[in-house]
Image (cartoon, grey):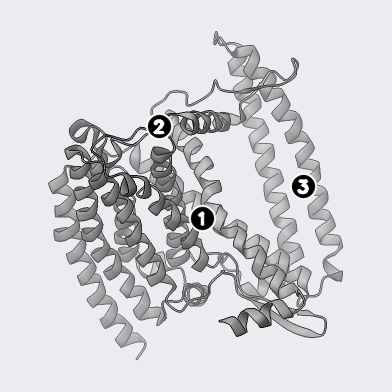
Amino acid sequence: MIDALTVFYSQKPTVEWCIMLAKFAFIFIPLVFIALMITLERRGAGFIQDRQGPNRTGIPLFSFLSHIRLFGLVQNGADGLKLFTKELFQPREAHGFWFKLAPAIPFMVVFLSPAVIPWFGPMVFSWGGQVVQVSGSILNLDIGVLWLFALGSLSIYGTVLGSWASNSKYSLLGGMRAGAMMISYEVSMGLSLLGMYMLVGSFNLQDMIAWQEVHGWGILVQPVAFVIFLVSLVAETGRAPFDVAEGESELVSGFHTEFSGMRFAMFYMGEYAHIAINAALLATLFLGGYSIPFVSTETLKANSAQALAIICGVFALGTLAFLFMMHRYANWYRKSKASDRKTRLKEWALYKALGWLAVPALLVMGVASLYFAKDINAGSFVSALIAAMIQILVLLFKMSFFCWLWIWFRWTLPRFRYDHVMHLGWIILLNVALVNLVVTAVVAKLFNP
């Protein structure tokens, strides 16, 4: 270890080391998704329940700009400030050290889990007369899936430990439910993934994406495994309809009843961060990860400038669609009798002005990409960097889809009864996963001896 550190510090900084250090920014992606998920949760709940979400909190600017609300994002800052300044209450009979440690455990897992997820394909380019290859993940482990499973199992310790350390019967019951549910659904989750392992022959996430680029997405090859894996992940995060560990009607608030302030916020934010990580895992295993349908990684690298131009055009069309929807909604809102009508119309006018500035900027960027395409070598650093950025955007888009799926489940399905949760895990999903595993083994043996 000392020799490796000596070699590291003795070498001059190279582009390979710079990219490897820049990849550590990926650990903050789940944290960014926390803010987006909270807003999406509230606005999505308002949309599903036919009501408004958070729409009043804003930042006062100049008089002609009024309040900037950012479609509810400012509400997150207000809630964060409130939780940060609230009293950290601790029950008299609680076990102090463990009570303080418990909220940090699931939050610690958030920073470790993104390390093995491939955010882009391997970058291979020439630099200084040498061929440089950089992996798309921070840690390219052959046991990447098992690493994520192990970290996911660690996160439950925060819930169980916090419930026990609270010294409250309601919290303890919630922690026991969470632990039992974790054990129940991890069995089905692991069995469902064994079918993909039989086909791919590797637990390396990079290998699984490469296999899907050739043979098709995992959701098409293993649809039953995808459903089982999705249900198990929803249960693992403790979200509705599997939120029996924090059932307000029975357990007051479950395992975090006695937590307040930032300790409660760490449990709260850890839940959303785990949704983002699980969404990235689902996208990687069953939707091809960073890959684009019908476009291989080599084709993308060879035509990276053209792909960037297409993406700029798609974003420009999306911005135009957004401006059209905002224009129609503003015309309807002018006729309403809402108390914040003038304030909101001023804010929307600012957003429309920014949108009309973004559209030509995106189009110019797309035309410039096509103009300079002939000067970009397929094996150059610029080509590899553009391809990597496009693949990161593709993976983030797939993650956002699954994050919305989590929200859709919560505000559509009623909470299950605890015995129904156990019955679904041990009687239904476990048996279906076993049957799927046997069928996959037979088919794999027959068609790929």
**Within 10 Å of the Cα at label 3, are there few (<14), some (14-19), or many (20+) other Cα atoms?**
many
**Within 10 Å of the Cα at label 2, are there few (<14), some (14-19), or many (20+) other Cα atoms?**
some
Please tell me whether mark 2 sits on a helix, a strand or a loop. helix
User: Looking at the image, can residue 289 be seen?
Assistant: yes
Q: Which sits earlier in the primary sequence, circle 2 or circle 3?
A: 2
The image quadrant that residue 199 belongs to is: bottom left
Q: Which sits earlier in the primary sequence, circle 1 or circle 2?
A: 2
Residue at 45% x, 45% y: name it: 404
Q: Which sits earlier in the primary sequence, circle 1 or circle 3?
A: 3
**Left or right: 379 in relation to 161:** right
Q: Residue 282, position in %: x, y? A: 42, 60
Q: Which label sits on residue 362?
A: 3
Please tell me whether mark 3 sits on a helix, a strand or a loop. helix
User: To which residue does mark 2 refer?
Assistant: 48
User: To which residue does mark 1 refer?
Assistant: 398
Quadrant location, the N terminus: bottom right
Q: Amino acid at mark 3?
A: Leu
Q: CA distance from mark 1 to mark 2?
A: 21 Å
Q: Residue 214, position in %: x, y? A: 51, 77
**Within 10 Å of the Cα at label 1, are there few (<14), some (14-19), or many (20+) other Cα atoms?**
some
Q: Residue 313, position in %: x, y? A: 72, 50
